[in-house]
Amino acid sequence: MGLHAESSNTPARGKPRLSIRARLIIVALVAVAPLMFERVRGLEKARAERTEHAHAQVIDMARSGAEAQREVTYSLRALMQVVAGLYARTPLQAADCNHVLTDLAGNIPWLRSMGVAGVNGQITCATDPRAIGLNIADRPYFQKALGSRDFALSDYLIDRLDAIPSLVAALPAMESDGSINGVVLAVMNLQWIGDLAAKTVQRSGTSVLLVDGGGTLVAASGDLKGLLGKNFADHALAKSILTGDEGTETRAGFDAVRRIFAYVRVPRTEARLVVGLDEAVVHRDIDHEVTIAYLQLALFGTLVLLAAWFGGEQLVVRPIRSLARTAARFGRGDLRVRAADQRWMKEFAPLAVALDDMARKLAARGEELQIANQHLEELASLDGLTGLANRRGFDRQLEDEWQRAAEGQEALALMMIDIDHFKLYNDRYGHVRGDACLRAVGETLSLVTLEDAILVARYGGEEFALLLPGLGIAQATALAEEARHAIEDLLITHDESSHGYVTISIGVESLVPRKGQPAADLVEAADRALYAAKRGGRNSVAANDALLLSEAC
């Protein structure tokens, strides 16, 4: 009972899931993985640092631009205070007023025009004659200047005269008694302010924007100038920057180009000065380095894998496979081959010596009997025309291999081969050329299947049969395709064939013998497959299991 229980609990040994070569590759990958991980981590860290530096850079740029505009505003206020003082102390006639304003404002690049309006809002003098007579009493900046009795700055608006975005400053002209006798006006050149901000940025892929409190783009640099005057209040970028006084964003801009943006609220307005760096430009260098690094890692990893693959093939797999082939040939009765004839590494040398010793002992026991029967065996089992096994030799070998496969529960494959339209070939070219054709086909089949077929036989007439122990249906079918192509490649002229040269049809079957099953089942199945190949148009290969499946469907 105890022994029975112990044996029943012993797990069955199946085939290993991983081959030796696969295990060598896994070891190589494990060795390379830490290096690859460290390299990738370093690159990602460098990319993150580059992004952080870009955020710091654009916020500095935006602050510098806002500070530049602050200085322009301070300069404008100082100039307007001079004009207001002159106007309050010495009221001027309209012509004199225009002349004085032109002299003061004419050489200032960031000032487009100046004027003076009465307390009723009507402009009485201006550097731009078109402005004289306009009434601005309804403008919030005019009302704010009168109400606060101090310098007031409008939000960005569309100029009535030129229909372009403008920024208007207003400053009351105060009498000595504190009364207001007029309001000095100045229109700032926003395009120059945008250029001033752009000059602080000497980097490719940079954009400078000025967005008013309503989301309208009132100033821009570079290619974005074509979007001036458009309202982007519903754009994600505008929604984001108008909610805070200062910050950074990484998103698509008004031109759909993804940038790293920084924004700062312009002093005394609801507008935002926005500086953006093209994200692709920011990351271009690091992305190039990342690409090179990944290519290097891929190349290094590939070299390691190739070394593991081919090194394992040369040093481990090939010697084992060679010893296995030698052992298989011993198992099939070929005791003349010697494993020790090859050069082996010291780990495999004892096994090769042991195999050779076994072969010598087996050869010594069977040599005398083999010599005695060899001549009769050859005469009785060979086809006189092709030198291949004849039908008798095939039948005997089939029974031996069938029994051996049944004992080892291994597959035994059979190819049944027929030369297409061979009778027509004999009728057209005569029996001499027909015999030559048979010999050529037999020799080619033997060469193609040299390592896999234990027997190539002339089954009868123009038919051949090949026994392939240990091959499944897929392997045997693939080998049959090689044989069919090899016969085609002989290019033996056959004008009676639709192909113009000699071709063959092949039926394939592979079976693992069941207990009591006759070997004739294998022959019948391969024969059915052969006729299926003929019915299918000849010059083809048909496998019996596929035939059975198609018939069942």
Image (spheres, grey):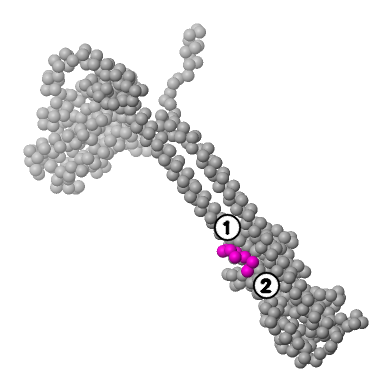
174, 298: nearer the viewer: 174
- Image coordinates of residue 479 in percent, x first then y, are 28, 35
Tell me the element at label 2.
Answer: helix
Q: Quadrant of residue 114?
A: bottom right
Q: Quadrant of residue 379?
A: top left
- Image coordinates of residue 70 in percent, x first then y, are 74, 69
Identify the residue at horizontal 60%, vertical 53% (top origin).
50
- Find disc 1 in the rendering and name its residue: 282
Q: CA distance from mark 2 to mark 1?
A: 25 Å
Q: Amino acid at mark 2?
A: Ile
Is any atom of residue 288 visible in this view? yes
- Find disc 2 in the rendering and name its residue: 193
Q: Which residues are magenta?
A: 198-206
- Image coordinates of residue 460 in percent, x first then y, are 16, 31
Q: Residue furthest right?
A: 177
Q: Tell me: residue 301, above or below residue 1.
A: below
Marks 2 and 1, the one that precedes in the sequence? 2
Q: Quadrant of residue 391?
A: top left
Magenta region, main secondary structure: loop
Identify the residue at horizontal 48%, vertical 10% (top origin).
4
For label 2, the crowd category at 10 Å Cα-Cα, with few meaning under 14, some 14 to 19 and many 20 or more, is many
